[in-house]
Amino acid sequence: MPVYVYEIESRPGQYVDLYMSYEERKRREHDGRIALWRYDEISDTYRVEWARFDMGETHRGFIDTPGTYPKESYALGSDPESIPEEMAEDRRLGIRYTEYSAEGCPIFRDKAHEREYVEKRGYYFRNAGYGDPTPKEKKHVQYKKIDRAERRRRIAERLRARFAESIERRDRQSAA
């Protein structure tokens, strides 16, 4: 079912996501506006708030995933007091202007901005999909197969090196 984003007219900048079919939208919407019934706890009544359809907010990002951006990243956030330092680092790395929330989280405007920020900072997505930043260097460790006797010998050498002093002391005490 599609998601439609409406901006509440009495509170500019506040949006509401409505999940409804195209037919329901066609039936409920008049001149790009829709009536939202809100419950008022103080007067114990319902009142009508009008909201206007916002094409830009609905179709941000990809067509099939509307309303994903702007996105606030808590994982890449920092201490709110260090926001000026973070912005200076962004400029030094050549990252486009990035806004930060009051909590110190970067706010990404679109997918390209997010990709640029993550790649230039040296981060990557562990569950990367198509177009997401991935690790640049993949380190594959090749383990040699060794037999059991060789493994025991190596373990014994490590233990002897670790406890050499106490073994020598024990040997001197037993010889005396």
Image (cartoon, helix red, strand yellow):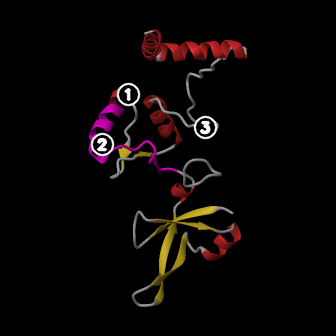
Percent position of residue 36, x then y: 52, 77
Q: Is residue 27 toward the left or the right of residue 58 in the image?
A: right
Q: Quadrant of residue 134?
A: top right
Q: What residue lies at 40% left-to-right and 32% top-to-bottom? A: 95
On screen, residue 104 above or below 121: below
Percent position of residue 42, x then y: 39, 87
Question: Reading the chain from its start, which is encountered first: label 1 or label 3?
Answer: 1
Q: What residue lies at 43% left-to-right and 42% top-to-bottom? A: 76
Percent position of residue 33, x then y: 53, 72
Would you say residue 85 sits in the magenta stretch?
yes
Picture quarter with the C terminus: top left
**In the rendered image, which residue does mark 3 sit on?**
128
On screen, residue 148 above or below 64: above
Q: Residue furthest front?
A: 176
Which one is closest to the eye, mark 2 or mark 1?
2
Would you say residue 115 sits in the magenta stretch?
no
**In the rendered image, which residue does mark 1 sit on?**
93
- Circle on res. 83: 2
Q: Quadrant of residue 139?
A: top right
Cα separation, mark 3 vs mark 2, equals 27 Å
On screen, residue 42 above or below 83: below
Q: Quadrant of residue 82?
A: top left
Looking at the rendered structure, the kind of residue marked 3 is Ala
Cα separation, mark 1 vs mark 3, equals 23 Å
23, 100: nearer the viewer: 100
Looking at the rendered structure, the kind of residue marked 2 is Ile
Looking at the rendered structure, the kind of residue marked 1 is Leu
Give the SS element for disc 3: loop
Which residues are the magenta region? 69-90
